Amino acid sequence: MKIDFRVYLLTDRKLCPGGEILETVERALDGGVRAVQLREKDLSGRELFRLAERMRKLTEGYGARLLINDRADVAMGVGADGVHLGVLSIPPREARRFLGPQAVIVDDILDTGGTLISACETLRRAGVQEIIVMVTHGLFTGSLWERLWSLGVGRIYCTDTAPLPPRLASTRIAVLSVAPLLCDYLAPRGAG
């Protein structure tokens, strides 16, 4: 499974103009987003499922990936590309029954790697064979984080918000620039 994390959108319909989440997500997809995490924690299971069905159709139309927050059953039911499992979600072993042998971990920071190592160990015990890690800030402090490679991590994606030490440059660590996103956001609207 390949997911384009250059621009990754987490939804919150309360922040969308008029609560129009589908219209807002479509604008983001028009702008280049190719991974959407449907994160609407206050919806009932039925409401989330109905919204996820509509979101799946929308993201498919753009060739974008859809991940569902916390609900492996909803993710499977709508054919989503993955699920975000938080500490209050079902255990990864149970989610694995729905989702298959791959996992994507999204975190805000990779410093020493302790949190990610713990998550990868849990996923491996649950039967995950291939893990992709995406972090906003790749600090890569010390060498403990290198244990990720032995835990099934095939690739680490990080943004360029922190410089990657030259000694770590490899095909296994992909650095994604935030500059195009910032330029697009700051560009005058309607400018051609």
Image (spheres, rainbow, N blue to C red):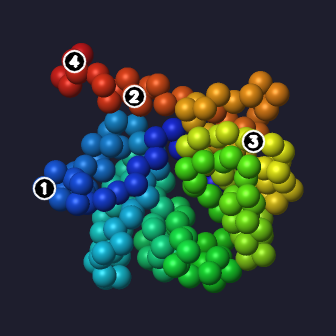
Q: 60 or 22, which is in the foreground?
A: 22
Residue 51 relative to residue 94: left or right: left
Expressed as whole percent of the image width and height from the top left, the position of residue 116 reads 69, 58
Residue shown at the point (25%, 60%) measured from the top left = 13
Mark 2 or 3 closer to N-term? 3
Whole-angstrom CA distance, mark 1 to mark 4, is 25 Å
Rendering coords of residue 16 (x, y %): 22, 53
* Three-letter amino acid code of the residue under disc 1: Gly
Q: Which mark is residue 18?
A: 1
Considering only order in the chain, which callout, 4 or 1, is on the residue closer to the N terminus? 1
Assign a secondary structure to mark 2. Answer: helix
Real-space Cα separation, disc 2 to disc 4, in angstroms: 16 Å
Tell me how far mark 2 sits from mark 3, CA to CA. Answer: 27 Å
Image location of residue 21, percent across then percent down: 25, 57
Earlier in the chain: of badge 2 and badge 4, it is 2
Task: Please report contact status of discs 3 and 4: CB closer than 8 Å, yes or no.
Answer: no
Q: Say what amino acid the circle numbered 4 marks.
A: Ala
User: Which corner quadrant of the image does residue 50 belong to?
Assistant: bottom left
What amino acid is labelled 3 in the image?
A: Thr
- Is residue 127 visible in the rendered image? The answer is no
Measure how far apart labels 1 and 2 are at the Cα level. 25 Å
The residue singled out by tag 2 in the image is 182
**Who's the residue at 31% across and 82% down the image?**
44
Q: Quadrant of residue 95?
A: bottom right
User: Farthest left residue?
Assistant: 18
Which residue is found at the position 25% from the left and 49% from the top?
Answer: 24
The mark nearer the N terminus, 1 or 3, is 1
